[in-house]
Image (cartoon, rainbow, N blue to C red):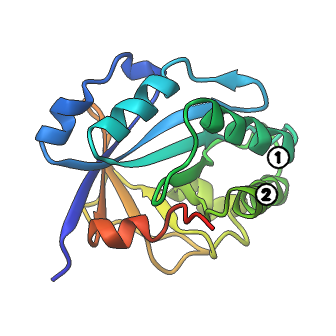
């Protein structure tokens, strides 16, 4: 039976995160918000990136999508913030937080997401996760993203047993709780999780 890795995700809303305490409590991986849209940078990201690394967690960074903007500009902004915080190391994870349509039709949102993901995959050599929730995916906002691993927000389902929306057939990370902090699980080992991350040339 595969082991289960426990993770959390954080943003500026959490303020200063006590990473050593989370690591001691069994947290093995984490994602921290880096950017939103084309101009916003999370003020706690550099602190979180360093804190995760120092606590020997599998490090993840995510970008909050604003589909009305330019996906390539937003992807460059995201990767620049990561570089400024110390850059990527082997096994680091990247993700697109896709949960708002900015008033656009689903096909436009999905096109934005595909372009963002392709740019990040090409320039950072990491296939990003797509974080989303059931109703949003079912509206068609995630069309064509099934080649990217799914990080599904599904808190009404038991831990490790989320509902998987189309276009995916399986999940990779399940966000099963949102209070007092967002909690996630990955079915597999640390080695299997880092295989989905950055691999230096």
Name the residue beneath numbered marker 2: 119
Q: In this view, does 70 lie above or below 114?
A: above
Disc 1, SS: helix
**In terms of image quadrants, where is residue 17?**
top left
- Which dot, 2 or 1, sits closer to the camera? 2
Question: How many numbered discs, if any?
Answer: 2
Mark linked to residue 187: none
Residue 139 position within the rendered picture, expressed as x and y whole percent measured from the top left: 67, 60
Q: Quadrant of the N terminus?
A: bottom left
**Residue at the image point whose x is 48% and y is 59% from the top:** 90
Quarter holding residue 166 = bottom right
Q: Do the residues labelled 2 and 1 touch (CB within 8 Å)?
A: yes
Name the residue at the front extreme. 201
Q: How packed is label 1: few (under 14 Cα within 10 Å), some, or many (20 or more)?
A: many
- Image side of residue 164 versus residue 80, left or right: left
Pointer 1 residue: 71
Query: Who is closer to the viewer here, 190 or 170?
Result: 190
Q: Is mark 2 on a helix, strand or loop?
A: helix
């Amino acid at each position: 039976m595969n082991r289960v890795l426990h993770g959390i995700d954080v943003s500026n809303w959490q303020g200063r995160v006590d990473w050593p305490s989370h690591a001691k409590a069994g947290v093995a991986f984490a994602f921290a918000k880096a950017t939103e849209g084309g101009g916003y940078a999370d003020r706690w990201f550099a602190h979180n990136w360093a804190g995760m690394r120092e606590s020997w967690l599998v490090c993840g960074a995510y970008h909050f999508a604003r589909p009305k903007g330019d996906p390539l500009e937003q992807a460059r902004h995201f990767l620049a913030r990561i570089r400024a915080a110390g850059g990527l190391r082997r096994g680091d994870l990247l993700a697109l937080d896709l949960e708002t349509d900015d008033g656009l039709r689903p096909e436009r949102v999905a096109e934005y997401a595909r372009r963002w993901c392709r740019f990040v995959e090409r320039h950072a050599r990491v296939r990003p996760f797509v974080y989303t929730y059931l109703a949003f995916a079912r509206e068609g906002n995630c069309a064509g993203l099934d080649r990217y691993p799914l990080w599904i927000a599904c808190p009404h389902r038991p831990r490790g047993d989320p509902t998987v929306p189309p276009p995916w057939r399986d999940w990779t990370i399940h966000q099963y709780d949102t209070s007092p902090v967002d909690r996630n699980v990955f079915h597999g080992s640390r080695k299997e999780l880092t295989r989905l991350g950055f691999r230096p040339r």
